[in-house]
Image (cartoon, coloured by chain):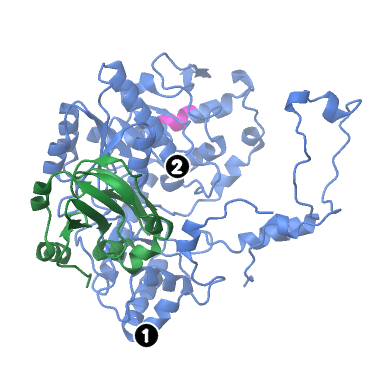
Chain colours: A green, B blue
Amino acid sequence: MAKVLDELYYTEDHEWLRVDGNVGFVGITDFAQGHLGDIAYIELPDAGSRFAAGEVFGVVESIKTASDLLMPVSGTVAEKNDSAEQSPEKVNADAYDSWLIKIELEDMGELDKLLRADAYTELTKE
Amino acid sequence: MAKHYDKLIFEISSDGKEGYLLPDTGVEGDFSKDAIPEELARADEPVLPRVSEPEAVRHFTRLSQENYGVDGGFYPLGSCTMKYNPKINEDAAAMEAFCGLHPCQPESDAQGVLRLMYELGEMLSEITGMAQFSLQPAAGAHGELSGLMIFKAWHEKNGQADRKRIIVPDSSHGTNPASAAEAGFEIVQIKSAADGTVDIDALAAALDDKTAGLMLTNPNTLGLFETRIGEIADMVHSAGGLLYYDGANMNAIMGYARPGDMGFDVVHVNTHKTFSTPHGGGGPGAGPIGVSAALAPYLPGPVVARSGDFYTLEAAGENSIGKVRSFYGSIGVLVRAWCYIKTMGGDGLKSASETAVLNANYLKELLKGKYKLPYDVVCKHEFVLDGLAEAQGGVRTLDVAKRLIDLGYHPPTIYFPLIVENAIMIEPTETESLETLDSFAEAMLRVADEAVSCPDILLEAPTTALVRRIDELKAAKEPVLVWQG
């Protein structure tokens, strides 16, 4: 059973968002890493890039498939996690410990559109 | 059985050895200095391996023994149509009259091959229901790219250059979105309906004045026929888009249904799947494309034309997307395809599709139960299982595939299409006997039993192959593609 953390926000495309003030950390869920299998590559945007909610901000590629990474909320990238990009196996090891990008949120109202833990757990059961 | 051998020829090279002697050039003076312009001459000697003739022969023979091909055993690789390729094709392609031709030979000296190309185009047109074919594209994906360039040229010609979006279902072959991206389009992926076919509502929602077209296989990647294809074609055309037919699954419908009649505007056929030419592996391939009459002026040129009993190469017109390959295509491959179609005949092709469908359904019925069957309906030439119904010790689809290697089979396609989580995609083709199908089913059922009674056998497989489980992650992350010497 894939791990879901209570304090996070989730997208239907299996990204998670941890919010701290107007700063957010974005990663992929444990469910996502399990389905991808061994991750070979992660491609992340540089600091300063801006993306609207739902836009593709990067790519994750595993032995089985390649998937786009979608922005949970609109924002500007403050930092990318070089360590995850260089050692993608860390995301397989603990998907919630290895965030991918740190962002500055633009509109806290967008959080209402994201899933909370119970709804996301329900989604992954389907 | 051969021992594992994975050396590069450079690794068995040693200085001073020679396996050949070049004849005298007959050119007076220093050939390399006098005959080759200075700016074209290389500064350094080329790095070539030095081996004797027997060493070279043993090297390549041993490498060939590492291979598993359809001439060696059953190869149920879904979506790839690994049918047996009749050896008469090889006889035809090896004829001096074909392989001794020079591409610059005058038309009057090459009437035989021009006639063959003309006839192949006509036969493919008849089989697919299209108006005209180009034999140039060198592979299926190259056919896709060429076809999408025709989409683009057509929209531009009609003043609709802003039609930039290509729609693909989420069950499509990976080459479809990849080719569309390569041709400069944006990709819109639509979800499949619960029955695995195109979701009409999702398609309607995706269509707009930016739609360039829809790419589809029919039957689709699940081996299911898109029965609403007429409606789908009308929707796309009404929205101003075009329809591209990926011919990957053509082996299911020859003589029964034609993409042209379904409303497709551009079609590619994979000669290596449907028409029994060798599968790539880096070698020459062919992915001829056929188009509707309206799109014929956009085909790559030259195309072969016939005037009475004389065949000519007609230069491309002003609307053509231009040449997509040097000269006229992979002729040796096209000879094999022509030979196959001629030896089979119309009734033979129809019967091939019928048997391909029968074989797939036969295997499907034998395997469902111990394997999950997500779409339990009559399939076409292939079907997709959703992994084992029951397993212990964390055994999954990958382990089933590896265990089948131990039992002497090439594994089916796994984890594709992406919409079936634990996909095992099986395509037996028409060329397999009842005995082969029964033996394979027996092996699959044995593996399913082992997954419950002794899962370690699966987790450790393959144990009898020349190599054990390969580190696919390392291969993907740190590929070594050229000699590192």
Quick one: quadrant of the C terminus of chain B? bottom right
Q: Looking at the image, can residue B429 be seen?
A: no
C-alpha gap between disc 2 and disc 1? 42 Å
Residue B103 lies, with reference to residue B480, above or below; the image says above
Percent position (x, y) of residue A15?
23, 56
Residue B30 lies, with reference to residue B227, above or below; the image says above
Q: Amino acid at mark 1?
A: Cys
Percent position (x, y) of residue B259?
28, 37
Left or right of B24 in this view: A103: left
Question: B351 or B218, which lies in front?
Answer: B218
Residue at far top of view: B318
Residue B34 lies, with reference to residue B458, above or below; the image says above
Percent position (x, y) of residue B291?
34, 28
Percent position (x, y) of residue B156?
30, 19
Residue under label 2, please give it: B271
Quick one: quadrant of the N terminus of chain B? bottom right
Both marks 2 and 1 on one chain: yes
> Callout 2: 10 Å neighbours few (<14), some, many (20+)?
many
Pointer 2 indicates a residue of which chain? B
Task: Give the quarter of the image for residue B175.
Answer: top left
Of the numbered discs in the image, which one, if any, rests on residue B454?
1
Left or right of A117 in this view: B285: right
Residue drawn at 28 percent across, 72 percent down: B388
Image: magenta residue range:
B118-122
Callout 2: SS: helix
